[in-house]
Image (cartoon, rainbow, N blue to C red):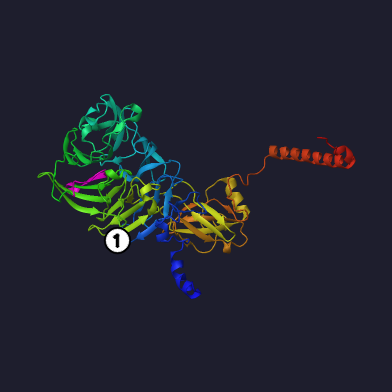
């Protein structure tokens, strides 16, 4: 190749080459890995480097709520991102979490999620409700000694909670070629009073559905309790104002409406649908679906997977869809209003969600595939983002059971974090603090820090109020972590970061950072020595001095020939 030809291609190579700013092409091809991440100086966890493929001012400006997990996610757990993909909050202490989102209870906002152990299909754990400071306010468990399943935790307008449960029970499986004394996972849901834990309502699938209505293959399952067969697979529950319940059965391919007394009112989809489909089958041909929600005017949203894990022979569609279906329960007809498809035409083998936003937009999480998309009411794609490489979507190495969008105000009780990078820069962040608009760097002499740590009293953090002085102007918050320059600190050996809201009010102050060592100053850093400590130190120094003198005397007076002797082997 001639040099001139090579030089002509340089701009193209530069445009395609990986860089610190993720290139969308390289990102989705997996050249940054299955889960490209972003590390921080002041925070010890790494968040996904989100690949924003499409954006629009018409998209809802709320936060995105995810629970990334999978073999490529080293720290699974609940996570909040802003609408641009910047980290707002993440926590690893809960481990794998499912269905993380904001919900309202008794007029207050809470973050709710499930956490526990799962076998890849069912979960055994509890449901948690965090208040605005990210402290656990409620821990909820099902009644009758059962364990909470990962699929659903929905707070109703009446202040109760709906939850899915799996219970292993004996069952006759002869109608599907199994043993008469077989075992199944029965799909249940309960409605629980959050304050008291009292059971309000319980429903179980085995009472209303025959095992031979399922689309799930029996194979060799169901012969023992330890290998029970899941014939129904309940994965969502909702409740309307009239008290009717709406449940999704993945393995029956149905949405079932249940009366307040437990009677099945109708079934949509599956082998015995109650509705005539006015959309040539498109409103009722969903399969392996998730996340059914009931809305005003008898409208349902359904995440139609169209696929079952990696079993290609069970796939019924080329891509997954977010469905909006209109029901006419007087004439028992169903009409498809919208079918929302990912720009990448994702076929999600499992999981997924559809959320109607107050603006009328629809927000779709693609479950098994690490992506979420926001659609306009007419189905136009407005915003589209990947938090994992699309080359690995089929593998499920990065996934989030559901994705939600909403408003949240977080005010953690922790202190902001600060850390040094090099000698001229520090970085400040505050995990979960949503109201920080700017940072002010302050500097102080050792005496001010020592006095602050010594008396433990809360002081005025305004400039000069406690021996700290402002360094430069306040700096607008940028993303999760903000860079601050210490060049104007002069000889002040200590700095700290002050978090300010939009009006300049102080929200929190970091610990003092020693500019020389880069270490944070803890409460004991300047603790005065006690008399007992002085005596002990003096004794230790005396012993060391005596040993040193003895060693010198020994080295001078003992002949070398006596110190070292030849050893025969």
- Above or below, 71 against 337 in this view is above
Which quarter of the rendering shows the C terminus?
top right
Q: Which residue is mark 1?
A: 58
Query: Viewed as shown, does residue 82 lie left or right of 538?
Result: left
- Depth check, front residue: 547 or 305: 305
Q: Residue 311, percent across and down?
A: 31, 43
- Depth check, front residue: 295 or 462: 295
Whether residue 286 is in magenta: the answer is yes
Stretch of the chain drawn in magenta: 282-298
Label 1: how many Cα within 10 Å (few below 14, some 14–19, many 20+) = few
Q: Residue 4, percent across and down?
A: 48, 75
Whether residue 84 is visible here, answered yes or no, is no
Query: Viewed as shown, does residue 149 lie left or right of 292?
Result: right
Whether residue 309 is visible here, answered yes or no, is yes
Query: Viewed as shown, does residue 537 lie left or right of 242?
Result: right
Residue ID at (29%, 53%): 363
């Amino acid at each position: 190749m001639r040099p001139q030809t090579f030089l002509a291609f340089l701009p193209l190579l530069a445009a395609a080459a990986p860089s610190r700013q993720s290139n969308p092409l390289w990102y989705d091809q997996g050249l940054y890995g299955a889960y490209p991440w972003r590390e921080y100086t002041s925070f010890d966890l790494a968040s996904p480097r989100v690949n924003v493929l499409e954006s629009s001012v018409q998209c809802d400006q709320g936060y995105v709520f995810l629970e990334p997990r999978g073999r490529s996610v080293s720290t699974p757990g609940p996570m909040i991102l802003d609408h641009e993909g910047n980290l707002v909050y993440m926590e690893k202490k809960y481990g794998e979490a499912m269905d993380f989102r904001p919900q309202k209870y008794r007029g207050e906002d809470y973050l709710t999620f499930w956490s526990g152990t799962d076998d890849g299909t069912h979960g055994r754990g509890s449901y948690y409700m965090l208040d605005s400071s990210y402290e656990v306010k409620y821990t909820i468990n099902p009644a009758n000694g059962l364990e909470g399943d990962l699929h659903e935790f929905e707070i109703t307008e009446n202040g109760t909670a709906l939850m899915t449960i799996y219970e292993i029970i004996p069952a006759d499986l002869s109608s599907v070629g199994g043993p008469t004394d077989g075992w199944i996972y029965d799909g249940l849901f309960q409605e629980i009073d959050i304050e008291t834990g009292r059971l309000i309502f319980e429903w179980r699938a085995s009472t209303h559905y025959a095992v031979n209505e399922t689309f799930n293959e029996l194979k060799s399952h169901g012969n023992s309790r330890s290998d029970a067969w899941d014939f129904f697979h309940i994965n969502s529950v909702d409740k309307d104002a009239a008290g009717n319940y709406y449940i999704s059965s993945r393995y029956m391919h149905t949405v079932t409406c249940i009366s307040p007394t437990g009677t099945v009112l109708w079934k949509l989809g599956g082998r015995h649908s109650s509705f005539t489909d006015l959309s040539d089958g498109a409103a009722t041909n969903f399969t392996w679906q998730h996340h059914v929600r009931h809305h005003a005017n008898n409208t349902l949203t359904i995440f139609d997977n169209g696929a079952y894990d990696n079993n290609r022979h069970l796939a019924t569609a080329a891509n997954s869809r977010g469905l909006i279906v209109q029901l006419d329960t007087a004439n028992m007809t169903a009409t498809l209003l919208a079918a929302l498809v990912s720009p990448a035409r994702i076929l999600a083998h499992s999981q997924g969600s559809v959320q109607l936003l107050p603006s009328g937009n629809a927000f779709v999480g693609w479950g098994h595939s690490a992506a979420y998309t926001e659609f306009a009411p007419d189905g136009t794609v407005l915003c589209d983002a990947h938090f994992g490489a699309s080359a690995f979507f089929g593998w499920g190495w990065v996934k989030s059971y559901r994705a939600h969008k909403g408003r949240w105000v977080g005010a953690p009780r922790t202190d902001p974090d600060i850390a040094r990078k090099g000698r001229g820069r520090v970085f400040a962040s505050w995990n979960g603090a949503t109201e920080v608009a700017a940072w002010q760097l302050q500097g102080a002499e050792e005496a001010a820090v020592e006095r602050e740590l010594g008396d433990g009293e809360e002081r005025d953090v305004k400039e000069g109020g406690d021996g700290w002085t402002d360094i430069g102007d306040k700096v607008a918050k940028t993303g999760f972590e903000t860079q601050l320059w210490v060049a104007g600190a002069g000889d002040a050996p200590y700095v700290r970061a002050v978090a300010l809201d939009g009006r300049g009010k102080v929200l929190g102050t970091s610990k003092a950072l020693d500019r020389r060592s880069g270490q944070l100053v803890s409460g004991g850093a300047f603790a005065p020595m006690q008399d007992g400590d002085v005596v002990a130190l003096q004794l230790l120094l005396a012993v060391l001095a005596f040993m040193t003198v003895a060693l010198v005397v020994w080295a001078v007076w003992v002949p070398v020939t006596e110190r070292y002797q030849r050893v025969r082997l």
